[in-house]
Amino acid sequence: MCFLRRPGASASWIGWRMLRQVIRRGLQSFCHRLGLCVSRHPVFFLTVPAVLTIIFGFSVLNRFQPESDLERLVAPSHSLAKIERSLAGSLFPLDQSKSQLYSDLHTPGRYGRVILLSPPGHNILLQAEGILQTHRAVLEMKDGRSTFIGHQLGGVDVPNSKDQRVKSARAIQITYYLQTYGSATQDLIGEKWESEFCKLMRKLQEEHQDFQLFSLASFSLWRDFHKTSILARSKILVSLMLILTTATLSSSMKDCLRSKPFLGLLGVLTVCISSVTAAGIFFITDGKYNSTLLGIPFFAMGHGTKGVFELLSGWRRTRENLPFKDRVADAYSDVMVTYTMTSSLYFITFGMGASPFTNIEAVKVFCQNMCVSILLNYFYIFSFFGSCLVFAGQLEQNRYHSIFCCKIPSAEYLDRKPVWFQTVMSDGHQQTSHHETNPYQNHFIQHFLREHYNEWITNIYVKPFVVILYLIYASFSFMGCLQISDGANIISLLASDSPSVSYAILQQEYFSNYSPVIGFYVYEPLEYWNGTVQEDLRRLCSGFTAVSWVEQYYQFLKVSNISANNKSDFISVLQNSFLKKPEFQHFRNDIIFSKAGDESNIIASRLYLVARTSRDKQKEVIEVLDKLRPLSLAKSIRFIVFNPSFVFMDHYGLSVTMPVLIAGFGVLLMLILTFFLVIHPLGNFWLILSVTSIELGVLGLMTLWNVDMDCISILCLIYTLNFSIDHCAPLLYTFVLATEHTRTQCIKSSLQEHGTAILQNVTSFLIGLVPLLFVPSNLTFTLFKCLLLTGSCTLLHCFVILPVFLTFFPPSKKHHKKKKRAKRKEREEIECIEIQENPDHVTTV
């Protein structure tokens, strides 16, 4: 064998090219042998996956257990707020039945909350009898205590800004805290009390028609988070039926011999049983279910059915005169290389999402499950579905009907039958099969792409409009990327018609003027009697409404005309006079004293701060947190600030976006490492551009569609990376390797080869998303929006943007044209020489 080298071509470039060809052919050879193995032992490869599904499927029913710790799932696993909570709890242990609390400062604990809302134009303060009736009804349940704080009135009307007296209010909020610390029995009693509390509120709402009651308990968030999976059960079954129907119809043809409707159906079922097996493995390994895992069936289906439809297209591209076992092997050789590559990328990206770098437990658990699902999906496609393809090929070779599995009658027999019988039982090619080069070209999607769409999209008059369309797409995407907001609000993960969401909306409307009460903890000894220290404390608390023993004590000293400028006087008056007065006794829990001999010291204390906020309270609370923390390091006063909501807000944006950045880096690294090894460097280059365009498009458009960066949208963005590669890679690699005369002809052949599978898969995927619209949950709305954008942007790039842009830019196809002309000229010259030398054997030439 000799190798021809173009002038100027370096030896290293030829070496890389040879290496790429060797790797590619080696992979194709391996997949060919895998296909032969499956085709020779179809029963084995059909039975093993089925047995695994039966074994692991029972564990789904026996070991199903929902995750009950919502904070563990959606709050950042490692955050400064959790350390601050631990320190605050060690300094000031809570006994919620005895302590005078201004808010649930360390942990939400167990509680019951109720908002009483008067009708528009009415004053809730005039409904005193109804409020007291509700209050007494709750107290009669025992084991509870009420706490009223300054910002517990909503829709307040203050006629005089100087007087600050409340004239009327639209809503009032009451919180009842329970003692649950100390034993598991108390916690069970508290859980029972919360259930009865919610039932009581529903009953009181029926009795009181003059105002509305909205209740919330500590378990409400978990209950309404888990409610999504309950609401979505029937809709997921409907989604499965829609995908089955779409896959069956799109795999059908008029040709009753070559039609493969059952293969489309069996392909979807293959993905389903692989997902069931993955779920069984998850529960066997002590995994706990949560509602974010609802996305896994859709993610797995989008990837698995792509492999199914590509194998079907690969089967249709094989020669009909080959034995069915060889056709299966050729289909594997043609398809499984790319499918192996895309499955590997899925595994790498979601594997990185499951790494310790991921700070959100829900994302980590989801990615771990996706990795198992992808592995099983790949195994089930080449084994279980491959076996189904073998049996279908055997039926086709023996000329059995693709639906009824009976022998197709001869043409003479059909001619004597009615038209309807001929339509049902005719293969459509009995008269012309010996002239037909590829009967599968008559598939309706294939026919539409070849005869109509390919000519239209590559028309020179259409290309300018496509360029304008892409500019509009890029502009909206860029505009959306500039408006990204993090989704630290846990309400975005709850069922939309749940009591928690109704309560949160009402609280945002009427109680958004003040932030949650923030605990301000001074954790080191401090000279409170020093004027400089007092000024520093005032400066730190400026801009807040402070509930402080320090300010109250200073005011007490001023009114009582007592001088306490030194340590002994300050602490003596504080202990012996101030804290013994009934109106100040609740401050005892806010100061920690230590005694060394006869001398007492203040080693720690706490204050309470409330900030004025606007409608976007959550964003402003995060800003307050970001401003206060650096001051604890810059000032001489060592303090921490904490509220339970900080656990969910602390560095949430960074924690959520990190998995996407890691996954994107993994994809980029993978493509760069294979840049000079796999298929063609320009294929990888175009793939990187396409994936980036789709990812940024989905990110920008979902932001414009009011989707925040929460754990669900982040998982969808990771999936977008893989979904776009899954569909763009075969199209791009076929294009760069094509040897037609022009780029236009190359993109036409690429669309003709892979367009059917892409269109079948994306259509099934998008149709399967429709039932999610009817699940009343914010989580499923986010899932629907993100996945709809993922499928739509991928479809737009595969069928509109890439077919046009690839005709403008490299790779050039001119050298292929020159090569073909040179070969043809050389062949003509050889034939002419043979004719001249052997005139008697012209006919044999």
Image: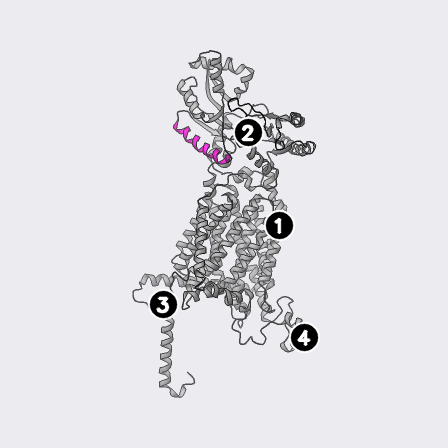
Q: Amino acid at mark 3?
A: His
Kindly report the distance in space between the C-alpha atoms of the residues bearing marks 3 and 1.
Answer: 54 Å
Regarding residue 285, the answer to whether it shows in the image is no
**Badge 4: few (under 14), some or many (20 or more) residues near its Cα, within 10 Å?**
few
| Disc ID at residue 235 | 1
Q: Name which residue type carries label 2.
A: Asp
Q: Earlier in the sequence, mark 4 or mark 3?
A: 4
Separation of residues labelled 2 and 4 (CA atoms): 83 Å
Name the quadrant containing residue 252: bottom right
Between 454 and 344, which is closer to the camera in this rendering? 454
Residue 417: image tag: 4
Where is residue 354 shown, x and y percent of the image? 49, 46
> Spatial distance from mark 2 to mark 1, Cα to Cα?
38 Å
Residue 118 visible, this orientation: yes
Quickly name the residue at label 3: 815
How far is disc 4 from disc 3 in space, using C-alphas? Answer: 56 Å
- Is residue 621 magenta-colored? yes
Q: Residue furthest right?
A: 207
The mark nearer the N terminus, 3 or 1, is 1
**Mark closest to the chain's N terminus, 2 or 1:** 2
Instruction: Say if the magenta span includes residue 173.
Output: no
Q: Which residue is mark 2?
A: 104
